Image (spheres, rainbow, N blue to C red):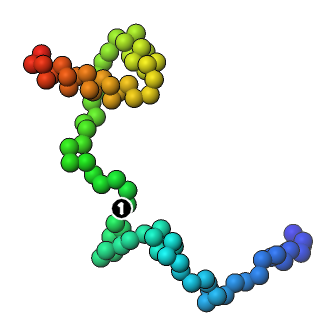
Amino acid sequence: MNAKVEESSTDWIDPDDAPEWTDEMFDRADLHENGVLIRRGRPPAEHPKARVTLRLDAEVAAALRASCKGWQTRVNQALKEWLAKGAA
């Protein structure tokens, strides 16, 4: 193919002309200690919840899902209350 290559429309930018870092840029930057990335966000829970598989009747599962967002939390709370009553 003998087509002429079009010139790039962007000019080269000298990395020495980079802007000064602002406090906001430093706040958003990743933090490393001894070469290890320190994760941000919510710290790990002291007592994390366990993932389980629970087999329910289809109509029970459908009703729970239809009851709106947060149904798993409500089921967890109901089971905690049931255990607290000594029903186990």
Residue furthest to the left: 86
* Circle 1: element type: loop
Q: Position of residue 18 (x, y in %)?
A: 61, 84
The answer to whether residue 24 is above or below residue 87 is: below
Q: Is residue 57 above or below residue 38?
A: above
Q: Position of residue 74 (x, y in %)?
A: 32, 25
Name which residue lies at 47% across and 68% down.
Answer: 28
Look at the image and tell me whether residue 27 can be seen.
yes
- Residue pictured at 33% horizontal, 29% vertical: 73
> Taking 19 as reference, is 27 above or below it?
above
Horizontal placement of 31 versus 51: left or right? right
Mark 1 burial class by Cα count in 10 Å: few <14, some 14-19, many 20+? few
Q: Nearer the viewer, residue 35 or 18?
A: 18
Q: Residue at the spot x=69%, y=84% of the render?
A: 13
Quarter containing the N terminus? bottom right
Classify residue 35 as left or right of residue 86.
right
Pointer 1 residue: 39
- Which residue is outermost to the bottom? 16
Foreground pick, 69 / 38: 69
Quadrant housing residue 8: bottom right
67 up-or-down from 73: above or below: above
Q: How many numbered circles does the render carry?
A: 1
Q: Name the kind of residue labelled 1 in the image.
A: Arg
User: From this viewpoint, which residue is outermost toward the right?
Assistant: 3
Residue under the point 30% across and 54% down: 43
Residue 58 in view here:
no
In the image: residue 23, left or right of residue 18: left
In this orientation, which residue lies closer to the viewer: 21 or 16?
21
Of the 4 image quadrants, the one containing the C terminus is top left
Q: Position of residue 24 (x, y in %)?
A: 51, 71
Image location of residue 31, percent across then percent down: 38, 71
